[in-house]
Amino acid sequence: MTDEYQTLQEPSEGLYKEKGSRFIAIALPVGSVQEVKQHLERLRKTYHDARHHCYAYRLGEEPYEIRYNDDGEPAGTAGKPIYGQIQSFDLTNLLIVVVRYFGGIKLGTGGLIQAYKTAARDAILQGKIVKRVWTSRILISFKYEQLNQVMTVIKEESLTPAAQDFMLECKITLEIRKSRVEIFLQRLKNLENVYSSVI
């Protein structure tokens, strides 16, 4: 199992026009449902005069956390086609919102599916797809005498501590790619009076 995933490097926008209707797609890298909610709230304010704010997102690893929403469009014509694009590019930790300004002419079911799909696809293509690594956060606690041994293991694993506290007892927090967690924890276990856990 790989610990790599693909997402967009930064937010990007796509556009599709059909019979006077404008479909503005905003693709946003996200890390949590909380972040998704904040973006949706912000975009609803920014595009408050738009008729629909349809969206889809995929978070985490398999089994993914997914959701799509038609926001008043006929069932299956908006959220699903948007999600289909996230899926076909094999992306995760991504939210795509497609805002629709109605042009007065109905597009029909097929037309809507095509519009939402194309707008979402354009937003992805306008962005830059990057590979990222799933990481775990580890907390290591130990006595000051073990500092050199612990730092040697950290150095050999090419890791950089995210936080350290050497007051009463030594504590180091760091991020490590998931595929290396077991090996790293095992190496620390071999040291005396060194305790480590995934947090």
Image (spheres, rainbow, N blue to C red):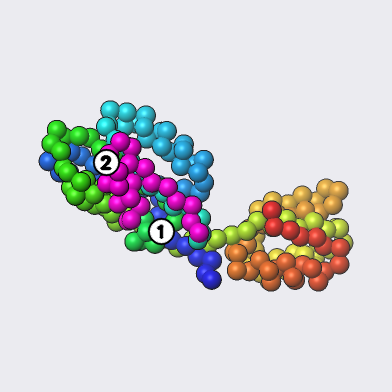
Residue hosting label 1: 91
Mark pair 1, 2: CA separation: 26 Å
Q: Is residue 6 left or right of residue 122?
A: right
- Visible residue check, residue 48: yes
Q: Residues within 10 Å of mark 1 (few under 14, many from 20)?
A: many
Residue hosting label 2: 74
Q: Give the number of callouts.
A: 2
**Quadrant location of the N terminus?**
bottom right
Q: Which residues are magenta?
A: 63-85
| Amino acid on which disc 1 is placed | Leu
Residue 181 place in picture, x, y as percent: 66, 66
| Residue 53 in which image quadrant | top left
Residue 7 shown in magenta: no
Q: Is residue 58 above or below residue 33?
A: below
Q: Residue at position x 69%, y 71% from top?
A: 183
Residue 105 place in picture, x, y as percent: 13, 36
Q: Residue at position x 86%, y 63% from top?
A: 193
Residue 42 place in picture, x, y as percent: 41, 33
Q: Residue at position x 76%, y 60% from top?
A: 196
**Disc number placed over residue 133 in the picture, else none:** none
Proximity of marks 1 and 2: CB atoms separated by less than 8 Å: no
Q: 185 or 155: nearer the eye?
A: 185
- Marks 1, 2: nearer the viewer: 2
Residue 17 place in picture, x, y as percent: 17, 44
Q: Is residue 32 left or right of residue 27?
A: right
| Residue 175 in which image quadrant | bottom right
Residue 73 shown in magenta: yes
> Which circle's residue, 1 or 2, is located before the other in the chain?
2
- Visible residue check, residue 26: no
